[in-house]
Image (spheres, rainbow, N blue to C red):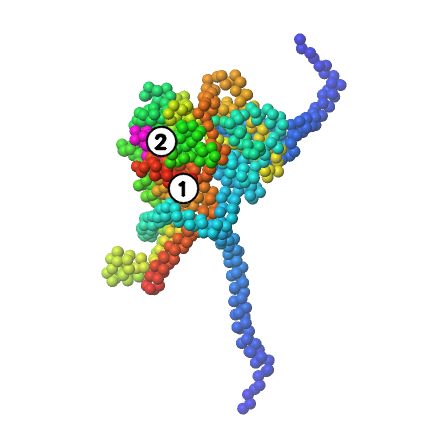
Amino acid sequence: MVMPRQPLGHNMEARRTDLAIPRSIEAANRTARRVGIALVGPALGLIIAINILPAFYGFYSSLRKVFFFRDDGFIGLQNYVELFQSPLTWQAIGRSLTFTFGSLALAVPLALLVALGVRQLGARGRLLLTVLLVPWAMSPIVVALLWKWILLPSPGGLAASILAVVGLPPANLLSDPSFAMPTIIVVGVWRTFAFASIILIAGLGQIPADLYRAAAVDGLGVIERFRKITLPLLAPSLLIVLSMLTISYFNEVQIIIGLTSGGPIHRTTTLGFLLYQTGFVELNQGRGNAIAIMMFLINLLLITGYVKLLGDKTRSEA
Amino acid sequence: MTSRIPLNRRTIVKMAGASAALPFLNGTAIGQSATGLPASSVRIWTFLSAEGKSPREVVLKRIIDRFKVANPRVSVAVESQPFQELETKFVAASAQRRAPDLIFMRDTYLSLVVSRNVLVDLNEVLSADFKRAAIPDMYEVFVRKSVYEGKLYSLPLWPSPAQTIFYRKDALREIGLEKPPLSWKEFVPAAGKLTKGDRLGFGLPTSDNSVSAFINMMTGFGPNIFDPATGQIDLTGGQALETADTVRALVKNKALSKTLLNAMGDDIQDQFAAGRFAMAQAFTPRFQQYKSIAAGYNSNELAISPWPSFGDRPPAALLGPYWTVGLSAQSENKAAAAAFLEALYSPEASMEWAKTAGLVPDRRSVMSDSWFKQPEALTIAQFVAILSSPGAMVFPQKLPDVTKLFTVLNGALQELIGTDEAAKAILGRAKVSLGW
């Protein structure tokens, strides 16, 4: 049987289609890449211009003697050597870590409690969260001024007036070397914990409700459900919260400037405040940049630690 | 007898013609006499606001308004800046070629600003009349500090004893005194007696970037506290240690409180106004303002005193930091800026600074005005007496490590007040921090 000859053009058409498919996919990929670059490019350009280049320039300046806007030349690592030789630097690193971890210890459980409460309360919870978010929306320096007035230990201060009503003397929290740091930790947490709650609420929303129902059938109590379901599945959100709050607390300076100016007796002089003091008050801009580089490296170290700790845990549980 | 102009047709035509010509004549007259200056603008950086709320701002606004009437083609813009950042921002702005025409600076920072070559030699821009009449009429002790190698870089504004002791006469009367004792030996026990209930005997700022209560106390030893060659203070020497002992004595008798470890100058002054102290260190040019906001006592009871001295020296007055005004080397409107600068120091302005803001007039000659003999000028007379007293002194023209000095010494003062550590160790650390 002679098969009817297919027209020559048909084969060629098929071959052309076979070849055309990969080509068109490649072209589509190319187009997608171009669109991606076009969309991300401007943002990337801005980040390079605003963050990356100044960071490099900051490092360059940290190797130079720059005082009151005059560059007196390259001095190598002298700014770093002098910083590490000063006991004030080591004390400031210690206080930065105290402020950071003290705040985290208070803010994360508080944010988690609020997140769980908000989910339980439904619409009323969301209203509560909106109210709690007000401090976060306020400028840190406004928060500092507000708390300065609240804590003013003389006639006119809110806390002093309340204490006076019950016959108690005013508390000098900001000028007492033992209480100044805990006080600024409380103010810092008051400003930020509600924002952390939002992230955790989003994380809680992604945990399947079936898991809780199954656990209840298996007879798991509330604490066990929290420990075995909520906490592990919330780890990615907790990682984000911990990273964001760590950076925020470690770099905090406006509340410290507004409330204690690094005092009393340097008790709230963190690295961030030392940077402000050195770079903006003493106008030693070279050394100020050296402190900034140091802060960046410590931040990087802390975040890497979190990723290693929580990231590994999340992967192993997955 | 009254004269009458006959109102006939010719008179009416003449009047109409004159009326029509008047605006042109007027314009010409103003254009030629009052606006010798071409159309331009003068930008001023100061800590004052142009809105005219505090007494000094009210006067500044009046001076600007008067200047604008006399120079309608020149606009004046006041751009308020935080007072502690004026010099820094000015030098930064100069590097970016966007500096204002006129800049208010603290005298303690003048040498740093001059070293950056951003100010013009005022001898080149001020009018001959002003140089002849006004500059010799100002207080020489302040003007001299603005001269570097024969060049005049700024003009001092509001000559005053800067940081003095504000006190409440009513509180001092309680212990049988009319005014604070003028030697530390007597001052310390008196300040202790003034502490009563919630009120403290003495308030000192301990956290400030531009004033140091420790230096103010040390001025009781006279101008030799500053090394004539270096401008440094011997922080571990006998005078500094005696000052430290005096601080500790004030803490011991409860005149000074550990609750003030973070107090800035503004905090002390606000709390003084609220009645927390019987005596406190305060910025003298704000005296009038503090009379108006006095809440914890009758404002008529507010008075000022120079600082006590050590030994049998005269009472001390450190005339600084004070404000001084310079003209940017980059200004494109130097003539207009110089004209406005001159307006700030006119005899009229001096009278207004005195009458409205209670400040010592920049022009000494206006003190002959009969107003200064009236009771409301009594405080100014006190200021002038302190300015002219044998214990009056200024900071060295080049104060070494000025950006760091006040912070370091305030840190040391906090440690003296708040700890029991040996004064020599605390001051030794301050010395090392300054690299002295």
Q: Main secondary structure of the magenta part?
A: helix
Whether residue B325 is situated above or below residue A122 in the rendered picture: above
Label 1, label 2: how far apart the Cα atoms are: 21 Å
Residue B404 falls in which quadrant of the image?
Answer: top left
Q: Which residue is mark 1?
A: B433
Does residue B226 appear left or right of residue B246 in this picture? right
Does residue A163 appear to the left or right of B290 in the view shown? left
Locate residue A11, reporting x and y percent. Answer: 57, 80
Q: Residue at x 46, y 39 (%)?
A: B401
Q: Which residue is mark 2?
A: B242
- What range of the chain is rendered magenta? B244-263
How far from the left and from the top, in percent, is residue B62?
55, 27
The quarter of the picture where residue A237 lies is: bottom left
- Label 2: how many Cα within 10 Å (few below 14, some 14–19, many 20+): some
Subunit that carries the residue with mark 2: B
Decide which of tag 1 and tag 2 comes sooner along the chain.
2
